Amino acid sequence: MDEPANQVLFSVFAFVLGAVVGSFLNVCIYRLPLDLSVNRPRRSFCPACKNPIPWHQNLPLLSWLFLRGRCANCGAKIAFRYFAVELLTALLFLAVWQLFPWQIAIAYWVFVSLVIAATFIDFEHFIIPDQITIGGAIAGIAASVLVPQLMGTDSRVAALIRSALAAALGYIILWIVLEAGKLAFGKKRIRLDAPTPFSWTRHEDDADFVVGEERSLWSDHFARESDRLLLYCHESRIDSRSYGEVTLDFHYNRLKAGDDEFALDQVNEITGIAHALQIPREAMGRGDLKFLAAIGAFLGWRAVLFSLFGASLVGSLVGLVTLVLGKRVWSAKLPFGPYLALGALVWMFFGDELVRWYIGLVSP
Ligand SMILES: [Zn+2]
């Protein structure tokens, strides 16, 4: 076979492999946050009717198109996300194959897979599982030892040290940002425009929390044991007990109202009129620290700084735009992982050019 035909064949292979891996990533995105096993049941199943999906209806990209995004058994809509993840993975696998020597390309395929899984899980669940972050950091260090060129060296020992240090840098630098952010934005006090009715209604081991027009899930407001949510009320009613001017001091599972204490699993309903509230606000999850460590392990220390800088910039812009459009509400959480992922991918593809451009800028 001549060279160009070989090239085409390998490129097709990279694309198809990407689509197949994307299909597996869809399973991870669905199952990892739910603590379901990734390979049991081995067969994929429809999220709506739980019917197993036979292999010929489970072909990456093609099946979604042929079935027009519906389950062949029950007709339930299958989210566009499934198709998008497969296409995105396929295209990134192809681009990586075209742009990098094959040893590096294989390492970057692993990295791209981790980044896509992290991004989509974070968007939906606001967490990045340890399997991806800690697993990713270990995989990155191992890949750097196997392919030292990832760390810009020929020495395996040097690559090991650089990769491990970059992972540590990623964790520590974001830890510092997080601690500083907690001092600055750790709590958010919201003054309501007018006295606003609220309700807290328990169902099973969670509750619906509604303030004015905004409805949220109780557990969404709490990240750790010490988090407190304060409601400043003109009046309130906890099951059968009434209070006048009172501050309701909530922890995740308990509540203080004046001198009275309640365990929230003994309370069914709380209602009242509030004029302000203070919510715990965690700018980032702990998963982001470990995710930036994984980015460092694969791409090196400069990628850590670039991803953090890029993520903060894009994150602020998105925050600003949603604020201006009036889409931002106080209960909305913003994931940070997808922005880190974007920064890391930009660095992976264009980092060398960016460095050259920057050096040209400072020393013409
Ligand atoms: Zn179905």
Image (cartoon, helix red, strand yellow):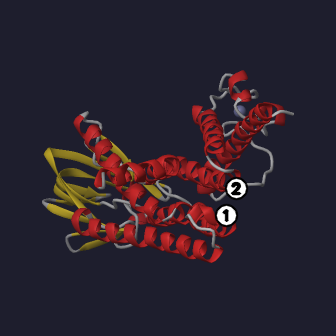
Q: Earlier in the sequence, mark 2 or mark 1?
A: 2
Residue, disc 2 = 103
The amino acid beneath tag 1 is: Val
Asked which secondary structure carries label 1, the reply is loop
Q: Which one is in front, 304 or 251?
A: 304
Residue at the far right in the pictured view: 1
- Mark 2 crowd level (few <14, some 14–19, many ≥20, 10 Å Cα): some
The residue labelled by disc 1 is 147
Horizontal side of residue 294 vs 225, given as left or right:
right
Residue sitting at x 50%, y 66%: 293
Task: Judge whether 335 appears above or below 317 on screen.
Answer: below
Residue 222: percent from the left, percent from the top? 38, 62
Task: Quarter of the image for the N terminus: give it.
Answer: top right
Q: Nearer the viewer, residue 191 or 160?
A: 160
Residue furthest front as drawn: 364
Q: CA distance from mark 2 to mark 1?
A: 7 Å
**2 and 1 marks in contact (CB < 8 Å):** yes
Tell me the amino acid under the disc marked 2: Gln
Q: Residues within 10 Å of mark 1 (few under 14, many from 20)?
A: many
Q: Say which residue appears at 72% left-offset and 40% top-offset.
A: 14
Quadrant position of ligand 1: top right
Q: Residue 17, image x and y in percent? A: 74, 42
